[in-house]
Amino acid sequence: MSLQEHVTAVFTEKYGTTPSLVVQAPGRVNLIGEHTDYNDGFVLPMAIDRGIWLALRPRDDDQVSVHSLDFGVTAVFHLNDLQHTKSGWGEYIKGVAWALQEAGYTLHGWEGVMAGNVPKGAGLSSSAALELATARAFQQVSRFAWDAAQMAKLSQKAENKWVGVNCGIMDQMISAAGEADHALLIDCRSLETQLVPLPPALDGSGTAVVILDTTTRRGLVDSAYNERRQQCEAAAAHFGVPALRDVSISEFLAEADNLDPVTRRRAKHVITENLRTLNAAKAMQNADADLLGQLMNESHISMRDDFEITNNELNIMVAVAQTQRGCFGARMTGGGFGGCAVALVHEGVVDGFVTAVAQQYQQQTGLSPKIYVCQPSAGAAVVAHN
Ligand code: ADP
Ligand code: MG
């Protein structure tokens, strides 16, 4: 049974009637453009075919009641009396209600049943999926127009200000605005977006995006993240610009000798990563899987040697993936110091790729990876209406 069928069946049993509608919002993976977001640069994520499904019906009052099948708990709150409770998944739902009301939307209550299949805390943004599914639910029962960028910004505000997690705009933007078969180039300064198709292989076959979870997690390295941000800010200040986005490669090369070696490497990563990301979007438009893969490989080297955010397991995973037949390219994805890599693979050899990578990674690290073959998918949507 699909998750959509599951939430529908449980809703029907619980309330004795079919749900008025089912909404869904996806998780995501970033194909290229890492640590560029806070430098006002470019990112290129795609929504994946894993997400949160929510079967619901409107209520006549201001109560919101959501039963989570994954946690076996029901969260209940009133729109006219939003209170922080001990942290948990319900706070994301409440946070979206708070941000929408703060922005002036008049909201109606609803009740529903929810389930998801984005692994939690693996860097595939289950939290954005939860926020955008919630935003879709409110948009439907409260009958206002769906503005993907606005819903993304308010969901980010919910996560920043209500939940208290300091994330950028990428996750919410792709979960709100993704399209099937496409990735989304996002300009993190202007928030302009451009859809680009996943390129086919040269023989006309499709390509698959494979997420390779090392199962290592970053642990207590917020300090390393803050340090990277500070180094980038210092580099931008050296060039007298608001962000590294504003430094061209020729300006960087002309000035590189006057930067200390660490700042030079950090700036080099961000400046070249922005170029790679723009080139990757062009390669996708030109249906050039080889070039996209090559840019992914170069991105990994830059994160390993210049930005220094990979760990041993990520380097092993990427090396193992890159040596497989039918792999166009691979790189670590996400914040770094653990988590996932992403590979672009010829569709015809995916099964063999998954088996070989799992086996060789396990051999070299002693760890069992988690591997997800993903399709580029649509953003938050109503998937059933009764
Ligand atoms: P991620 O990298 O997956 O976004 P986060 O820590 O940002 O990790 O968000 C994970 C949190 O999102 C979970 O702890 C939970 O509160 C919420 N969440 C994710 N998936 C679900 C789900 N299927 N049902 C309820 N809550 C969920
Ligand atoms: Mg998250």
Image (tube, rainbow, N blue to C red):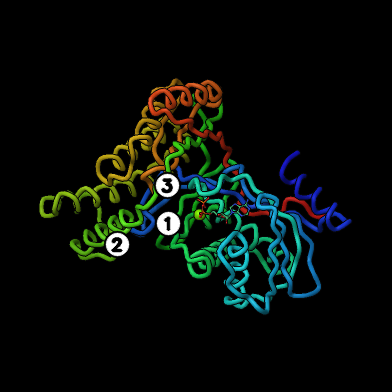
Q: Local crowd at mark 3 within 10 Å, few (<14), some, or many (≥20)?
A: many
Q: Amino acid at mark 1?
A: Asp
The residue identified by callout 2 is 243
Q: Position of residue 78 (x, y in %)?
A: 70, 74
| Disc 1 packing (10 Å; few <14; some 14–19; many ≥20) | some
Tell me whether circle 2 and circle 1 mark residues in contact (CB < 8 Å). Answer: no
Question: The C terminus is located in which quarter?
Answer: bottom right
Marker disc for residue 222: none
Q: Secondary structure at mark 3?
A: loop
Q: Residues within 10 Å of mark 2 (few under 14, many from 20)?
A: many
Q: Is residue 278 visible?
A: no
Query: Does residue 5 lie above or below 231 as drawn?
Result: above
| Residue ID at (78%, 75%) | 61
- Quickly name the residue at label 1: 187
Residue 201 versus residue 373: which sits nearer the camera? Answer: 373
Residue at 52% in and 26% down: 354
Residue 276's quadrant in the figure? top left
**Amino acid at pointer 3:** Gly
Identify the image quadrant of the N terminus. Answer: top right
Q: Quadrant of residue 241?
A: bottom left
Q: Which residue is mark 3?
A: 334
Q: Nearer the viewer, mark 2 or mark 1?
A: 2
* Residue nearest the viewer, comparing 256 with 82: 82
Q: Position of residue 338 (x, y in %)?
A: 40, 43
Q: Nearer the viewer, mark 3 or mark 2?
A: 3
Identity, as a three-letter code, of the amino acid under mark 2: Ala
Q: Is residue 45 visible?
A: yes
The answer to whether residue 339 is left or right of residue 6 is left
Give the residue drawn at x 58%, y 72%: 84
